[in-house]
Amino acid sequence: MVRCVYDFAEGGRDLAGLLGGKGANLAEMTRLGLPVPPGFVVTTEACRAYLAGGAEPAGMSREVSQHLAALERSAGRRLGQPDDPLLVSVRSGARFSMPGMMVTVLDIGLNDDSVEGLAKTSGSRRFAWDSYRRLLQMFGATVMGVDSALFENVMTEMKAVRGVPDDVHLTADDLAALVETYKRLIRDETGQDFPQSPAEQLRRAVLAVFGSWNGARARLYRRRERIPDDLGTAVTVQRMVYGNLGADSGSGVAFTRDPATGRRGVYGDYLPDAQGEDVVAGIRNTVPLSDLEHLDPRSYRQLLDHVDTLERHYRDLCDIEFTIERGTLWMLQTRVGKRTAEAAFAIAAELTDEGLINDDEALARVGGEGLARLMFPRFDVARVGDPLVRGIPASPGAAVGAAVFDSVEAVRRAAAGENVVLVRQETTPDDLPGMVAAQAVLTSRGGKTSHAAVVARVWAKCACAGPRSCPSTSTAAASPPGTAL
């Protein structure tokens, strides 16, 4: 019988093939003594067995139950316990990073009873109902197959009725009403009720992650990145920590160096009172990570220490996700970060100068394809004139094309030989075909660490986020150069 589950404390980055990149790096951070919420990993071998046989491998359910029981004992509460629920996240994690291509489900364990317990223990009824609506939205879309746009439409209508710009301004009663609407939506679209059993939620979420390995967008991404189809994905199950508990909480993404240029410094995005998915999905405009120094100086100093530890340990640019829960910093993920060709050359040279890698390692990290990508197109500013808007330079370059507001239409018009720029409020993984077809991507929301930005940098696609009108020619000229579209 194949072993299917490993605790974080049992692994390390040398087991990336078995535990996936996410799970192996969580295990590595645990071994380094960094503050990682405890959890366990269901292996890629279990995924391959499930995909080959159409059923979970023998013994997997028992192993998951055993590791969950250990997690419950360490937390002092049970999954979905009505008066004080333990909640977990379920995330995909293949050996090679595939950002946003597979399934994530947060807040597993919430139901009609435990949401009231979470409200009491957290002291925030709004937080509890916000967490429940997030679970319904993610579970309904990724596990039960409901079109995610239907949930977004309901949310948009609610914000319009209440006259608020984003979900942060919705009240607890608003969110409770959304929960009921989401449950009806799931029932209407699938003929099934959202499962109230926490154990059933966990089981179905794990199997949905396995199934997402063969999803259309994941297959397209693997073809583009030349990732073998037979690797499978691991599943990480981790105790939830919350960035949406108020002004003293938040989530962010940090890079040990600028992934666009390779320069050392504080780079990344932060969102107060938000979960990590809000940051990478680009659904709200972030603030620069440097703002955290003023918002929470203690957590900021701790983060800088951990960032330095990770870069020296991995001897490379690291991409780090973190959450601050009421002033306590938690490290949720690290991986060797995606970067532009310009950054790859700069980082390899600097790490060599710092003695972290030798000349042979430096040469192995760059190549002919990267050298070709250094020749990014640029506009002749003197001929183009003053910009109308400036945005966050998510991925460098310049592009010209017809503005297209739908991914399917972008694919169709590009196939007909037309240059197009995909324009979206924010991209989702379903927009991947349109991103491939377009010359560039422009999003009205998001930042340097959203999924759109990460994917664009990997593929040397020009991308710009959060455009804002230039108030005057003189102001525009004084602004730092950004991505041009």
Image: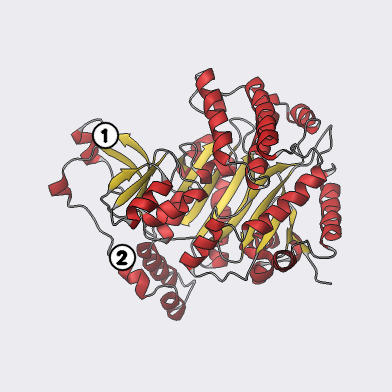
**Residue furthest left as drawn:** 383
Decide: is 282 above or below 36. Answer: above
Q: Residue at x 59, y 48 (%)?
A: 322
Secondary structure beneath label 2: loop
Residue at disc 1, secondary structure: loop
In percent of width and height, residue 473 lies at 19, 35
Q: Could you tell me residue 130's position as x and y percent?
A: 65, 31
Could one spot residue 266 in this view of the protein? Answer: no
Left or right of residue 62: residue 228: left
Q: Position of residue 177 (x, y in %)?
A: 66, 23
The answer to whether residue 362 is above or below residue 418 is below
Q: Which mark is residue 285?
A: none
| Observer able to see residue 57 | yes
Q: Amino acid at mark 2?
A: Leu
Residue positioned 53% across, 51% down in the render: 304
Q: Which residue is mark 2?
A: 374
Q: Which residue is mark 1?
A: 470
User: Residue 372 appears in which quarter of the rendering?
Assistant: bottom left
